[in-house]
Amino acid sequence: MEAILYKSNPWWEEMYTFEGYRRDKYLKILIHWLDNKDIVFLTGLRRVGKTTILKNFIATLIEEYHVNPKHIFYISLDLYVLDGYSIGEILERYRKIHKLSSAQKVYLFLDEVTSKASYQKELKNFYDFDNVKIYASSSSASLLRDKNAYLTGRQRHLEVMPLDFQEYLLFKNVHLKKADAHLWERYFEDYMQDGGMPEYVLTADVTYLQNLIDNIIAKDIIAHHHIRNNQIVKDYYKLLMERSGKQLSFNKIANILDISVDSAKRYYHYFEETYLVYSIEKYGKLNERIKGARKIYASDVGLRNMTAGYRDKGAIYENLVFLKIKDCDPRYLYIDGIEIDFVTPNGILIEAKYHSRLNEKQRKLFDSFEAREKYVLDGYKGFVLLDELEA
């Protein structure tokens, strides 16, 4: 095991420099939480960049905060060689290597922490009895559920999303000047087609995206939930991607796939738990929200386009707007058969229109609906407006 630990922590023996692109909006949050003892969980889609962010943060701790490199321990807990070892046993081996007592503060980075069945109980013990700051990651929301409440009041969650447009340009090494304003829209269209999965943005290897989809479905859904009919799950995902930005009817899905409505609901939750899709409620009173169909969105438009094809730019643009405002808890407005894309709890009404206009009925609803602020977003300029609203 010792050789694996040294390979996983090169900063123990040599100068460590992070090689890659910084995702500053996540680093700022991790730094802000640095002095808080809470366990920090990085969540999100597989291959979205959680490990890279952790490695970048480790370099920041060493270079900018002058943390002793031997007091930083990183390990990916899904390594085959670690099967049969508890997290506590692995941590004990680390402390022995560097002769660190439990009173000496260490920074633990536990990648794919849910690979260990008893991780919640172990993390609670570390939190309560050791001088540690713990950062952990997982690509499964279901496995992070704390059924026994071991970590209640001891944890914070940070969801890592696919690259936003500014990060996309950074990864593409595109640095536009004000004089190049006419190119913004062109690059934004590239972003609409490519999406924001970091490795794909860097390589443009289409087989990477397809393999990623296949791996998530095969490992995190089919194998994990012991599903016998693999094709149904694959076909279900295709249907979801074709319906991104639309209301989801479990009855229709069940009829198309020839499965029960209960199975359609259960399978859908598996897709949500692996961060492949998101959904929003209908705007209205509680009973309307509960009874109303949910609208669904892809977690990444590149994955959506790989599955459903690069068509219906209006739906793709709406999906990107949703991802941009997801943390604002948006809902969709639907009255008398007329729909407006988003209403936020703080009273902002948003319609995403990619090079198109509101029809007459939409315009009437948009103008008559009481809202603190109203926006019709279009293309790259609409994203600039969202950036200004965030600021």
Image: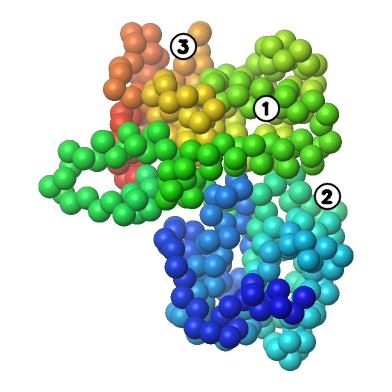
- Residue 128 position by quadrant: bottom right
Instruction: Locate residue 84 relative to residue 249 in the image: left or right.
Output: right
The residue pinned by badge 3 equals 338
In the rendered image, residue 358, in percent from the top left (x then y), is placed at 33, 16
Identify the element where label 1 is drawn: helix
In the rendered image, residue 170, in percent from the top left (x then y), is placed at 35, 54
Distance between the alpha carbons at the discs numbered 3 and 2: 41 Å
Q: Does 374 appear above or below 82?
A: above
Amino acid marked by disc 3: Ile
In the rendered image, residue 319, in percent from the top left (x then y), is placed at 46, 31
Q: Quadrant of the N terminus?
A: bottom right
- Residue 365 position by quadrant: top left
Lower position in the chain sequence, tag 1 or tag 2: 2
- Residue 13 position by quadrant: bottom right
Q: Nearer the viewer, residue 15 or 360?
A: 15
The residue pinned by badge 1 equals 234
Kindly identify the residue that appears in the image at 29 percent across and 22 percent down. 355
Instruction: Locate residue 110 relative to residue 372 in the image: left or right.
Output: right
In the rendered image, residue 43, in percent from the top left (x then y), is placed at 62, 52
Distance between the alpha carbons at the discs numbered 1 and 2: 29 Å
Identify the element where label 3 is drawn: strand
Is disc 1 surrounded by few (<14), some (14 to 19) or many (20+) residues within 10 Å? some
Asked if labels 2 and 1 touch by Cβ distance under 8 angstroms, the answer is: no
Is disc 3 surrounded by few (<14), some (14 to 19) or many (20+) residues within 10 Å? few
Q: Nearer the viewer, residue 248 or 114?
A: 114
Q: Does 17 appear above or below 150?
A: below
Kindly identify the residue that appears in the image at 51 percent across and 8 percent down. 336
The residue pinned by badge 2 equals 147
Kindly identify the residue that appears in the image at 40 percent across and 29 percent down. 317
Identify the element where label 2 is drawn: loop
Amino acid marked by disc 1: Lys
Instruction: Locate residue 88 relative to residue 113 in the image: left or right.
Output: right
